[in-house]
Image (spheres, rainbow, N blue to C red):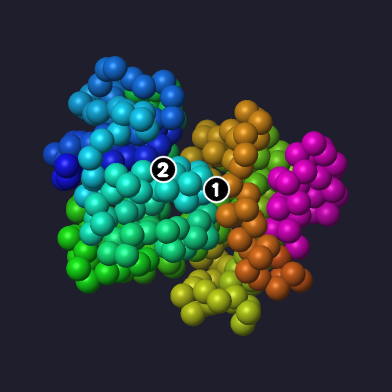
Amino acid sequence: MTKDAWLVVGNGAIGLLWASKLRQHGEQVTVLCRSDIPNSPLNVEDIDEEGNTRNTQSDIEFVSLDQLEGKYTKTLLCTKAFDLVAAYLDVRKHTKKRGLIATLCNGLGAQQDLIPHLKKQQNLWAGITSEGALKLDSNRVKKTGDGDSFFGLLKEQDDNMFGTDFPFPDVQSRNIERRLIEKLAVNAVINPLTAIFSIRNGEVLEAPIRPIFDAAVDELANAMHCEEFRFKPLVEDITAEHLHRRIANVARLTSMNCSSMYEDIRNIRQTENEYISGFFHRETPRSATPIQDAFYAALNDTAHLEDHKKKLLSQF
């Protein structure tokens, strides 16, 4: 049985937020949960322009993997980067062979790792979002910040049932790889700093962290212009000034938020380090990214995080 509906894989904050957005757009939505299957509507808490709290309820079907039935024409994978391939393989038999697969995860690399596992005629759309969200319960999410979302084709098959049109308004991007790298740069500065130093996003702009922030941004701008960086043609017009403005602006707009990486460290969970600082650790010359290398090493050695903090502070 084919279901012309969205299957959202992952009921974290972003998965719940996007399930609500899709349902409000008139789509039928099923959310796949690992545990705590809700039996009541999805509730999204938001603040309106006048500062009043508003709640939006959406009639969403929540299921576990063993309850999943049929084949879905549209699948949105809202998982951690390190879970992306496994999450798709879990539901692969429930995806239509000419259907659409989309991703919303941090970092870069996992999206490309997914491509060999797709069914031959499936299109892959990579997505990014700067919207903030906080999961309050298994069926409750709070929107913590406005932002933009974009989806663009990474793998295209002409006979896919949706072609080159993404079935959600005002989010389609023709330069998604550039957007992915720009978002990655934001994550590669804010996320490690907040996780290593146990601070909120806005505090990366304050002493004693600000010098490390400034040096990390300059380093990324230079690294993206290295001849050895395979994505250089996509981002060679991005200046250090542009990157400073962009990343600092995100830190200010989300100043009271805790990054996902900070939350992962605080809750002793696996981080997306391999797809954020790890991406630059692998994709740029070793001498080009000593700060990213230091972030990468620290987050792979959380048992000695205090030593890594002291070392970073002593260098700047």
Q: Is residue 248 left or right of residue 137?
A: right
**Amino acid type, callout 1:** Phe
**Quarter-of-image position of residue 287:** bottom right
Which circle, 1 or 2, is nearer the viewer? 2
- Residue 238 image label: none
Residue 182 seen from this side: no
Q: Residues within 10 Å of mark 2 (few under 14, many from 20)?
A: few
Q: Residue at x 28, y 41 (%)?
A: 7
Q: Nearer the viewer, residue 120 or 260?
A: 120
Q: Nearer the viewer, residue 316 or 56?
A: 56
In the rendered image, residue 138 lying in the magenta stretch gets the answer: no
* Image location (x, y in percent) of residue 138: 39, 22
- Residue 90 image label: 2
Q: SS class of the residue under badge 2?
A: helix
Q: Residues within 10 Å of mark 1 (few under 14, many from 20)?
A: some
Residue 97 seen from this side: yes
Dot 1 or dot 2, earlier in sequence: 1
* Image location (x, y in percent) of residue 4: 16, 45
Q: Residue at x 68, y 62 (%)?
A: 281
- Number of marks drawn: 2
* Image location (x, y in percent) of residue 142: 38, 28
Pointer 1 residue: 82
Q: Which residues are magenta?
A: 290-316
Q: Is residue 251 left or right of residue 19?
A: right
In the rendered image, residue 311 lying in the magenta stretch gets the answer: yes
Q: Which quadrant does the C terminus fall into?
A: bottom right
Q: Residue at x 26, y 35 (%)?
A: 69
- Do the CB atoms of the residues marked 1 and 2 lie less than 8 Å apart? no
Q: SS class of the residue under badge 1?
A: helix
Q: Nearer the viewer, residue 306 or 118?
A: 118
